[in-house]
Image (cartoon, rainbow, N blue to C red):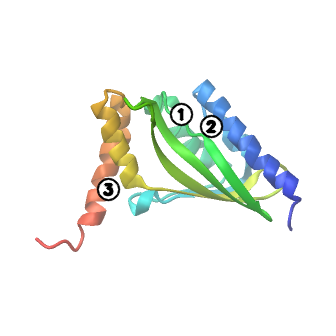
Amino acid sequence: MSYPHAEVEASIRGLAEAFIEAERRGKWSWLADAFYHEDCVYTCPYGGAMLVVANGREEIRKTHFGRDMDVGSGWKGWTFPITYWTVSGDQIISHWLNRGPGKRPDGSYYETHGVSLITYGGQGKFKSQYDLFDIAHQMKLCDELEDAGLLDPNLKKDWVIPMKRRLIEMLGQNMPT
């Protein structure tokens, strides 16, 4: 079934606005109920270093919008604006940013880019989402934030270092000795 373009467009616009509210609250888990069908599948491969697949709203709430996004995980001061999107039938491609705290001395943001491939499923909710972003550039960004004194120590301990280890292990295979 194909939904009206205006309905699909309204869903992604609503998500972009909800991201701003989630950043303000420092809580993200509520987005699972507001924007995802009960049986939605949310996937983020983290550059091949760590596949996260959340099957259903409850897993989305616990993983992506809970463990990974809530402020307690070290993301305080980060924002994740959805900057633009395109809609084709029930398919949405959105562009968003992982924007770190503070700004560089030149006034630019500390940020990396990502895209989401989303399938709309009616009733203002999504039935699938697949996120892609450059994890190597994200790690470089975190190094830059640390050098500037802006990287949360918990984020470094709980996310950056483990992710770097996964990347090194993954990319170290078949390397000459």
Query: Is residue 54 in view?
Result: no
* Residue type pointed to by label 1: Asp
Q: Is residue 174 left or right of residue 164?
A: left
Amino acid type of disc 2?
Ser
Residue 96 visible in image = yes
Measured along the vertical axis of the image, is residue 171 above or below residue 54?
below
Vertical placement of 122 versus 69: above or below? below
Determine the secondary structure under disc 2.
loop
Which comes sooner in the sequence, label 1 or label 2?
A: 2
Quadrant of the frame with the N terminus: bottom right
Q: Secondary structure at mark 1?
A: loop
Q: Identify the residue under disc 1.
A: 70
The residue at 71%/43% (across/down) is 15
Task: State which quadrant residue 131 falls in.
Answer: bottom right
* Image x and y of residue 152, in percent: 37, 29
Image check: 9 left or right of 136?
A: right
Please say if 63 is above or below 41: above
Tell me which residue sits at (74%, 48%) in the image.
Answer: 12
Q: Please tell me the numbered disc located at residue 166.
A: 3
| Residue reaching furthest to the left | 177
Q: Position of residue 33 (x, y in %)?
A: 72, 42
Q: Place residue 88 in its image quadrant.
A: bottom right
Query: Quick check: 17 left or right of 139?
Result: right
Check if mark 1's residue and mark 2's residue have beta carbons within 8 Å: yes
- Label 3 SS: helix
Crowd around label 3: few <14 · some 14–19 · many ≥20 (10 Å): some
- Residue 155 position, x and y percent, is 38, 35
Q: Residue 25 placed where, x, y %?
A: 62, 25
Residue holding disc 2: 29
Drawn side of residue 145 relative to residue 112, left or right: left
Q: Nearer the viewer, residue 18 or 50?
A: 18
